[in-house]
Every structure is written in structure tokens, then in C-alpha cells.
Amino acid sequence: MKIRFTLVTVLSLISVLLFGAVAFAATDFTQNGFPKVVAEKKIEAGEAAKISHSGIKITIPEGTFSHDVTFQVLEGDNNFFQAKAPAGETVVMNFAFRVMDMETNQLIGAFNKALTFSFKDKDINSGSIYYNFKLDGTLANNNAASSIEGRTLSHPVGGAPVGWVITSLTNSIKK
């Protein structure tokens, strides 16, 4: 009986590990259209931080993470996302986050506090739209309102369960 229990325990552990690996791969946005790490920062538990890269500014408030994390900003090819964008809109930016808990070595999907993402670009305007890029490869209008001031779009982000795409009306893009 003890041998059977051990075998069942081992098989259960293997199933959990296999399922965990599948879940990990499913949420790793480098495998879902955002292969390039464009910025990375180690952030200590509870620490406030700022990350900037090519028009992107991310402000992370104190208390956002309970453990030390590696915070990565990911990007993909705009042409990949353009094929999924609505007619009459041009993709001007795409990004995702990969946040790894350095204590547990697990990806973090939800943050303790929302961070602020902002993107400044000549093609951002009052008609720009902020989309979620879902794991099934579709775009869905993000329900939370973005703020657009001049050429800067800002948006609160409470976690990393999706990637994001920003579009502007094609006829508003400056050539």
C-alpha cells in the first residue's frame, strides 16, 4: 500500500509540474507575439521604480510587488499586430510585461497596485485606441479609459494577463 501511495504521489507531482509548465508557457508573452525584451529592471519588494524606453514611461508605485521581481517590457513586430487591427487603424505601438517573482520563480499576473504606463509619440492623438491583445490572438478594446494629453497616452495597468496594442486612425498618422 505504501508503494502505491508513493507512486500515486509521484505521478500527481509530475502532473502538477507538467500542467504548471503548460500554464507558464501560456502566459509568457515572449511566446505570444512579443519576443523582444526592450527594457528590464530588478525591483526590490515594496520599492517604487521607473522604467523608460523609446517613448515608453512606466511608473511603478511603492508597494506594487510583495517580493523582489524582474520586470521586463516586451515588444513585437507592429506588422504582426497590424494584421489583427480593425480596418482604418494603424498600429503605432505594442507591448507586454513579463514580471518574474525572484523568490518563487513564477510569473506575476496581478499587481498589488496599478502602475502607470504612458507612451509619447507623434502618432498618438485624440483618436488613438488602447487594445488588449488576448492569448487567443485577438484584440479587444480595453474597457478602462486611457488618458490622452497632446501626444501622450497614459493608462493604469493592474497586472500582466494580456499584451497591449495602441492604434491611431490611419488617416491621422503623420507621414
Image (spheres, rainbow, N blue to C red):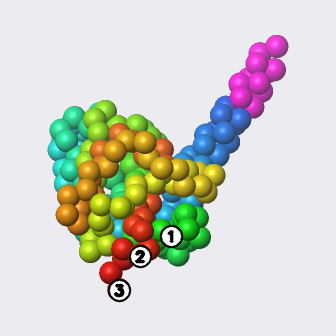
Q: Which residue is situated farthest in the top direction here?
A: 1
> Chief secondary structure of the magenta span?
helix
Marking on residue 175: 3
> Which residue is at 27% across, 71% downward?
121
Marking on residue 171: 2
Is any part of residue 75 visible from this angle?
no
Label 3 sits on what residue type? Lys
Label 1 sits on what residue type? Gly
Quarter of the picture containing the N terminus is top right
Query: Distance between the Cα atoms at labels 2 and 3?
Result: 10 Å
Residue 109, horizontal then vertical, whole percent: 44, 40
Residue 144, horizontal then vertical, whole percent: 37, 41
Mark 2, secondary structure of its residue: helix
Question: In the picture, residue 128 is in which quadrant?
Answer: bottom left
**134 or 1, which lies in front?**
134
In the picture, measured across the screen, residue 4 lies left or right of residue 153, that is right
Residue position marked by numbered label 1 in the rendering: 88
Residue 119, horizontal then vertical, whole percent: 27, 62
> Which residue is at 30% across, 67% downward?
124
Residue 6 sits inside the magenta stretch: yes
> Badge 2 local density, few (<14 within 10 Å), some, or many (20+)?
few
Q: Which residue is situated farthest in the bottom direction here?
A: 175
Whether tag 2 and tag 1 are in contact, CB under 8 A, the answer is yes
> Which residue is at 42% across, 65% downward?
167
Residue 52, horizontal then vertical, whole percent: 23, 63
Q: Tag 1 or tag 2, which sits nearer the N-term?
A: 1
Query: Distance between the Cα atoms at labels 2 and 1?
Result: 8 Å
